[in-house]
Amino acid sequence: MKLSFFVRDLVLKHTFTIAHQSRDVQDTIIVKLEDGDFYGLGETTTNPFYGMTAENICSKLEESRSMVENGNWSSPEKLWEMGKVVFKDNPFAQCALDLAAWDIFTKKKGKKLYEYLGLDPHDIPLTNFTIGIDSLEKMVAKMKEVDWPLYKIKLGTGNDLEIIRELRKHTTSKFRIDANCAWTAQQAIAYSEELARLGVEFMEQPLAKDDLEGMKEVFKYSKLPVMADESCIVESDVKKCYGLFHGINVKLVKAGGITPALRMIKEAKSLGMKTMVGCMTESSIGITAIAHIAPLLDYVDMDGAMLLAEDIAKGVAITPDSVTFPTGNGIGAELV
């Protein structure tokens, strides 16, 4: 087995702003595993909010080289367990390796990933299309640029209700909102009633992750369901979210890949919680990986590649009516 990895820039169509950061270019790290005639690709993006840089991700991948190339691992799950010590403080790096391991593993099995997992590719919820924070005029223009039945609206400004009121004038599409930890419990509860009237489906992470008492109040009194994002990063967080959120949004990058994400989804379902997987502005490599496990989910946010000015890969094709997978086995995405 041979491990290689490299950094690429993903240029965005528009400046992407959320409550705590803004960017025009997203760094991404591509991992490649090669074994004879087979190879697998994985991906992780960087994120300053979580302290994940191209430098520390690549450093961890290099640290794992001997384990990956010489270790006795027969499955992605085994490799993930072997890597827990190396990657304990860098799940982003572990995600890229895990995706590549699933890609090459299922290619060797002669199956697409969703086939290996026993999932129906026709049973995939519609992805939302994300509208980042901007001026009202530009947010309306972005929405009109991509006519989509379901939008996720990023909030966390001083005029959040005004934004939703204005956007509602221009579309009948369903909304989801994501405040990225920017609100207080009082704001979330107060806003929820009007947001429900304005056709919002749920609120994602309205409060800071450490505001547990506030989330108890929001969970009790909100007129909308609430989904955990920043509060649900790794497997141990799932149980902590029970009774505070109606569902969880798992990010493969933050969790450490498909391997832990599958366990998180299973645990959340056992607790009666809704499940969602979200993206971190990956190229079609990471987005295609999400699509393969999307039949397990109630909701999905896999629009990352749609936000790019130019994709560095080709993979799953997403329209409001269908999700079309690549013809190849494994995850099936390819660099272009």
Image: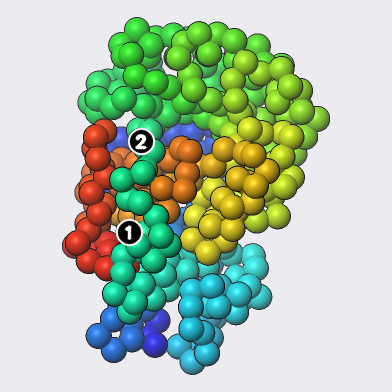
Q: Return the residue nearer the eye: 306 or 290.
A: 290
Q: Which mark is residue 126?
A: 2
Q: Is residue 10 above or below residue 37?
A: above
Quadrant of the drawing holding the N terminus = bottom left
- State left or right for residue 206 relative to residue 36: right
Residue at label 1?
A: 285
Q: Residue drawn 54% across and 48% down?
A: 250
Q: Residue drawn 66% across and 75% down?
A: 85
Tell how many labels: 2
**Can see residue 170?**
yes
Image quadrant assignment for residue 314: bottom left
Q: Position of residue 155 (x, y in %)?
A: 51, 25
Q: Which mark is residue 260?
A: none
Q: Residue drawn 48% across and 38% down?
A: 298
**Can see residue 83?**
no
Image quadrant assignment for residue 38: bottom left
Which element type, helix, strand or loop, lies under badge 2? loop
